[in-house]
Amino acid sequence: MYREPKLTVVGAGPGDIELITLKAIKALESADVVLYDALVDSELLKYAKNSEHIFVGKRKGCYAYQQDQINELIVSRAYSHGHVVRLKGGDPFVFGRGAEEMEYAVKAGLEVAMVPGISSSLAVPASQNIPVTKRGAAESFWVITGTTKEHKLSTDVALAAKSNATVVILMGMSKLSAIVELFKQEGKSELPIAIIQNGTRQDEKVGVATIATIEAEVARQNLANPAIIIIGEVVKHRAAILEVAQEYKQVESQTV
């Protein structure tokens, strides 16, 4: 039975498989082919039981496919099989290249659709009780890629360091020293910073420090990619919540 060639770009969420949306599950259930990335939990493929599954992600600097090859694979599989789902971690429109793949597909004559995902830039801090905005602490937030396509630190980090906003940096661990230096230059050595590796997953690791001490904390815990960097006064909210929760437990244990 012939099926119209179609691409649906789908966000899988930040890592925890329960954070995928119902609409994303429905897209997977209707897929003929699923192309999935390294940050996607392969358990989600159970929703695409009757489809071909192709890993196209990057692991430790090794590419299963280059981006041009992925684009061509989307088109060829859509014309040979029908509905292609491009499954990406987080939200495909937040540093996920989803827009580029949709542009390529639509120029090749495919019908295209997009299912947003819960962005790791918001969900990962939230899972550790770190809000990106909080009254009296942060009125806005930046979400910045730490590494540009030229493999350099984004110039937006320097601009963000001058503001009072919360700064969330993705793909920035290799540039951590440069990021820290920019904030020190703005007199913000004591500003709180958190680094969350494998956010929302079972193997999640969290490091909390100040700009002045974060590199030592990273070395102590051996924190590495994939990780998200959160900088700002809102990081203090996590410790405050944990402290209140601990106090409540102590009071409760004394009254039992």
Image: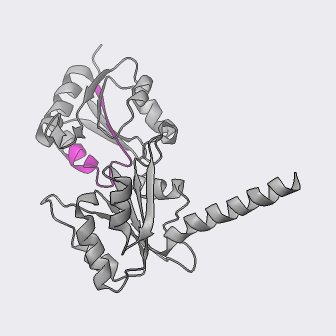
Q: What residue span does the magenta drawing correspond to?
A: 83-103
Quadrant in the rendering for residue 255? bottom right
Residue 112 drawn at (x, y percent): 29, 39
Q: Residue at x 33, y 83 (%)?
A: 162
Front-most of 150 and 24?
A: 150
Residue 210 part of the magenta segment: no
Left or right placement of residue 221 versus residue 147 in this view: right
Relative vertical location of residue 119 with respect to residue 8 in this rendering, above or below: below
The image quadrant where one finds the N terminus is top left
Relative vertical location of residue 132 with respect to residue 226 in this rendering, above or below: below
Left or right placement of residue 100 versus residue 28 in this view: left
Res. 238 in view: yes
Quadrant in the rendering for residue 87? top left
Residue 179 drawn at (x, y percent): 27, 71
Front-most of 190 and 221?
A: 221
Front-most of 87 and 37?
A: 37
